[in-house]
Image (cartoon, rainbow, N blue to C red):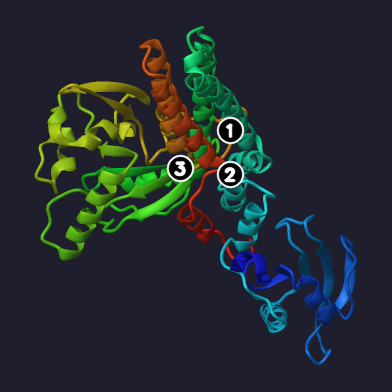
């Protein structure tokens, strides 16, 4: 048997540091024997015992609540015990050391959840949702993670798999009984079922994209020349005095990051050094970091303080090419750039608005506002949310990761390919192969088909004790 089948593991399940309550969690075949030594008796199943926690000399380490769950009726599917004592750093560590002394080993990150997955208590989607719930940065993200943890996402994938398997059965049967002129494909029923499956995959993908936005958010970089108002815009968006604002050019020399939340959508805002040539070594390093952030951004807010209509568009965009050898027209990230016309409070009768200007073959969005006065900031927040298609009011979104999106996109393309093969009267083997690969893609989402490397990567990012 593997190590994960035979070892008893333990960990402190609460956050490190002082707290009112600290929990040591144990899982594995030696759990009951360890409980007997620490408590001085064998605990009842699913019964809260108030007890003293004893060391090897029967001296009290602590006292608290002991909860015991027997296999298979536990989170991990194994014998599990929680010792809920006081949250002092020394007390928790002393209790953990006692458990280790009695034959357990320290759990790896995410090993409790991994055991639950391997023992078929949860699927891979639900296991990932545990970590996502802990890391949620908004109430909407937490609710979406809970929907995944409760199996809503898994249920949708399972339904798709069942429909796909039914279609595969008809195609495979047509291949197997080709000598008997039995053809389940030519009557259009398989094609019709695949069209329904395709529609369901697309709907699931749309929900998953919303969930991915709730989990990951987007990276927005504020760029521009010195004194254009970049730091003021960061402060206005975050509602905090995060960045130092002065009239001295070059005040910001390094990247400054804040996270805001718009209707549950996390937005990671990065304020950059002013884009200008400089002989100062520190400032040039700030410019290099700014350029790197710009190239990786989901959206770039290029802020200018000149909103004259006659201003040359290429001149407005010129700060973006200071540290590159490319022309403005060749910048890939120009498609992700929005011009921010700042300081409209200095002009007469100018209200915040959104429009666009033409440059080459692109239509570049423009927003006028006053970062210092907070005029138009709500307009910018709504713009950022709408720009990426985020809908906070959409019901049923569930937390999703990049691997889930990739698998759904791949499955969608394979089902589309199968439909095209049917329409073209291609060999049935090609249709069957498309459907087989589509099933494998969907199965990988829930862990039905998963590699050890994938599992290792997923669970290694969990906190110890989960």
**Image spot of residue 450 (x, y percent):** 51, 48
Q: Which residue is mark 3?
A: 403
Between the residue at mark 1 and the residue at mark 2, the CA separation in whole angstroms equals 10 Å
**Image spot of residue 93 (x, y percent):** 67, 80
- Sequence-wise first label, 1 or 2: 2
Between the residue at mark 2 and the residue at mark 3, the CA separation in whole angstroms equals 11 Å
Q: Which residue does the image show at 27% across and 22% down from the upper left?
A: 356
Judge by depth and name the residue closer to the eye, 321 or 122.
Answer: 122
- Sequence-wise first label, 2 or 3: 2
Q: Which residue is mark 1?
A: 157
Q: Secondary structure at mark 3?
A: helix
Callout 1 touching callout 2 (CB < 8 Å): yes
In this view, the mark in front (3 or 1): 1
Judge by depth and name the residue closer to the eye, 423 or 383.
Answer: 423
The 10 Å Cα crowd at callout 1, few under 14, some 14 to 19, many 20 or more, is many
Above-or-below relation of 440 to 200: below
Q: Which residue is mark 2?
A: 125
Q: Secondary structure at mark 2?
A: helix
Q: Quadrant of residue 415?
A: top left
Above-or-below relation of 307 to 65: above
Callout 3 touching callout 1 (CB < 8 Å): no
Judge by depth and name the residue closer to the eye, 48 or 292.
Answer: 48
Residue occupying the far top of the picture: 187
Image quadrant where one finds the C terminus: bottom right
Q: Which residue does the image show at 18% across and 35% down from the upper left?
A: 317
């Amino acid at each position: 048997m593997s190590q994960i089948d035979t070892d008893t593991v333990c960990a402190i399940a609460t956050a490190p540091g002082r707290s009112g309550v600290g929990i040591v969690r144990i899982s594995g075949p030696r759990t009951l024997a360890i409980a007997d030594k620490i408590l001085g008796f064998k605990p009842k199943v699913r019964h809260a015992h108030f007890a003293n926690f004893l060391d090897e000399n029967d001296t009290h380490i602590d006292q608290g609540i002991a909860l015991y769950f027997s296999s298979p009726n536990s989170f991990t599917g194994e014998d599990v015990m929680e010792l809920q004592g006081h949250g002092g750093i020394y007390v928790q560590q002393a209790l953990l050391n006692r458990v280790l002394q009695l034959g357990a080993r320290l759990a790896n990150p995410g090993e409790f959840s991994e055991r639950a997955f391997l023992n078929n208590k949860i699927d891979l989607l639900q296991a990932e949702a545990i970590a996502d719930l802990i890391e949620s940065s908004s109430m909407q993200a937490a609710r979406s993670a809970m929907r995944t943890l409760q199996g809503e996402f898994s249920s949708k994938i399972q339904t798709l798999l069942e429909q796909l398997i039914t279609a595969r059965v008809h195609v495979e049967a047509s291949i197997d009984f080709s000598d008997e002129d039995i053809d389940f494909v030519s009557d259009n029923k398989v094609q019709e079922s695949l069209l329904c499956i395709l529609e369901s995959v697309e709907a699931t993908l749309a929900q998953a994209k919303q969930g991915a936005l709730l989990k990951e958010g987007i990276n927005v970089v504020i760029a521009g020349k010195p004194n254009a108002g970049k730091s003021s815009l960061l402060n206005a968006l975050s509602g905090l005095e995060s960045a130092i604002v002065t009239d001295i050019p070059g005040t910001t020399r390094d990247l400054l990051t804040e996270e805001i939340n718009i209707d549950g959508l996390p937005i990671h805002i990065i304020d950059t050094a002013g884009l200008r040539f400089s002989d100062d070594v520190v400032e040039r390093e700030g410019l290099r970091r700014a350029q790197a952030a710009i190239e990786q951004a989901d959206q770039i807010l290029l802020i200018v303080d000149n909103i004259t209509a006659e201003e040359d568009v290429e001149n407005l965009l010129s700060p973006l090419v200071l540290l590159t050898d490319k022309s403005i027209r060749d910048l890939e990230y120009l498609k992700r750039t929005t011009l921010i016309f700042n300081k409209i409070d200095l002009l007469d009768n100018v209200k915040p608005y959104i429009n666009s200007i033409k440059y080459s073959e692109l239509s570049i969005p423009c927003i006028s506002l006053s970062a210092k006065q907070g005029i138009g900031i709500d307009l910018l927040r709504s713009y950022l949310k709408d720009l990426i298609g985020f809908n906070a009011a959409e019901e049923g979104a569930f937390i999703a990761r990049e691997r889930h999106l990739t698998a759904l996109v791949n499955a969608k393309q394979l089902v589309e390919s199968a439909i095209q093969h049917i329409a073209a009267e291609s060999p049935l083997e090609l249709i069957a192969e498309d459907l087989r690969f589509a099933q494998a893609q969907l199965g990988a989402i829930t862990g039905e088909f998963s590699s050890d490397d994938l599992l290792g990567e997923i669970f290694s990012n969990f906190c110890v004790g989960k």
